[in-house]
Amino acid sequence: MSLYIPLKIRAIREGILQQEISIYCFERSEQGSKVAQPLEFRFEDEGVSFLPIVRLSPDEAQSLMDDLWECGLRPSEGTGSVGAMAPQFELAATQRHLEDMRKLVFDYLNKMMSHSNGLYHREEL
């Protein structure tokens, strides 16, 4: 039986009045438990490339985002809703919606006008 537990990254509110958010990272396997240590910063020359502090799978990143949401954090810009689309897609969806609404209104008005006296058509409105 495998005891491997994939990388876990957790965000938890801590500190006085829970004003801080602590990030924990750990992994368990048959060889034992591994726990991430606090980050250490060092000076580097300008232009030197460096590696990311962690690479996450989409599931691991989603878990971290869920924890941050539970901690009360929300996106600072945009809609802030779960599953929000990129702005260019939101605009296109809004434009399609408006066109649909225009069609519905004009079709309704044409129908109402044709029932009242038959003299008005969409093109005249």
Image (tube, rainbow, N blue to C red):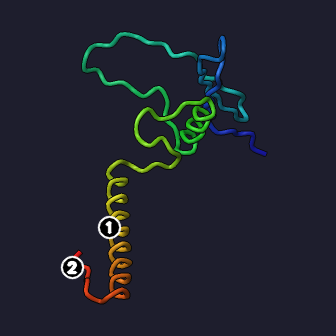
Task: Tell me which residue sits at (62%, 29%) in the image.
Answer: 71
Instruction: Depth check: give the residue in front, 88 or 31.
Output: 88
Could you tell me which quadrant the C terminus lies in?
A: bottom left
In the image, is 98 to the left or to the right of 56? left
For label 2, the SS is helix
Q: Earlier in the sequence, mark 1 or mark 2?
A: 1
Between the residue at mark 1 and the residue at mark 2, the CA separation in whole angstroms equals 16 Å
Front position among marks 1 and 2 = 2
Q: Residue extending furthest right?
A: 1
Residue to which mark 1 is pinned? 99
29 lies above or below 114: above
Question: What number is the disc on residue 107?
Answer: none
In the image, is 75 to the left or to the right of 8? left
Image location (x, y in percent) of residue 91? 33, 54
The amino acid pointed to by label 2 is Glu
Image location (x, y in percent) of residue 93? 37, 59
The amino acid pointed to by label 1 is Glu
Task: Tell me which residue sits at (72%, 28%) in the image.
Answer: 32
Q: In the rendered image, which quarter is residue 108 located in?
A: bottom left
Question: What number is the disc on residue 123?
Answer: 2
Disc 1 residue crowd, few under 14, some 14–19, many 20+, Cα 10 Å? few
